[in-house]
Amino acid sequence: MDLLFAIFDFVLHFDHYLPGIIETYGFWTYLILFGIIFCETGLVVMPYLPGDSLLFVAGALAGAGFLQVEILLVSLIAAAVLGDSVNYWIGHTAGMKVLEKNYSLVRREHLETTEEYFTRYGGLTIVIARFVPFIRTFAPFLAGVGKMQYSLFLSYNVAGAVLWICAFTLAGYFFGSLPIVQENFSLIIYAIIGISMLIVGSIVLNVFRSMKARAGNDNS
């Protein structure tokens, strides 16, 4: 429980933590950011790590001159691509064993939501899921469980990583220096997290509704 509170605090106040990390670790900050994005996308039990908010804050600090935006983009895109690939192969080789273990951090509703995404959007789920917290962690895992052809998965993986990383990082880079953004930075981070949670909540609700509707049709 303490770990979840620590992660929650880290996500909500990442704008306060990252400058200190940069000052302490310098160039190694890129590796730290690489590791966070890699774990969030690559380990099915790590969906709670910051994603969208981290990218926006990192981009804003790059715009302020604390980080090099070119290195940031390349390293984070690489982390996202490698993370999804590792997650895919975990699902491909040991996916059913992981599901059978029923880990408390692997929420059944998130898996069901992601399965619904695959049913509806097919391979594009890998791209779309990049912009949906939790779902982006489970999508490559379930693609591996479902034995999606890796070459096809990789093409969606790269496209989604480039779009996701560039969208949030460059948004922070170009708009993070605006006075109105700097004066309300914490509120913007809360808004990013809140909107992400609303998206997840609406998707989960729609999935439960569709499942209930299918169950009603099966019983009729």
Image (cartoon, helix red, strand yellow):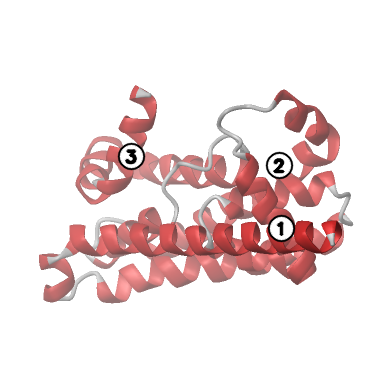
Left or right side of 190 for 69: right
Q: Amino acid at mark 1?
A: Met
Residue 102: which quarter of the image? Answer: top right
Q: Which type of secondary structure does the marked residue at label 3 adopt?
A: helix
Q: Which residue is mark 2?
A: 86
Nearest to the observer: residue 201 or residue 169: 201
Q: Position of residue 57 (x, y in %)?
A: 30, 58
Position of residue 160 relative to residue 32, above or below, is below
Q: Amino acid at mark 3?
A: Phe
Q: Earlier in the sequence, mark 1 or mark 2?
A: 2
- What residue is shown at x 77% (from left), y 56% (from top)? 215
Measure the alpha-carbon separation of dots 1 and 2.
Answer: 30 Å
Q: Amino acid at mark 2?
A: Val
Q: Which type of secondary structure does the marked residue at label 1 adopt?
A: helix
Residue 181: which quarter of the image? Answer: bottom left
Nearest to the observer: residue 151 or residue 105: 105
Quadrant (top left/top right/bottom left/bottom right) for the C terminus: bottom right
Q: Position of residue 17 (x, y in %)?
A: 24, 42
Mark identifier at residue 211:
1
Quadrant (top left/top right/bottom left/bottom right) for the N terminus: top left
- What residue is shown at x 53% (from left), y 60% (from top)? 132
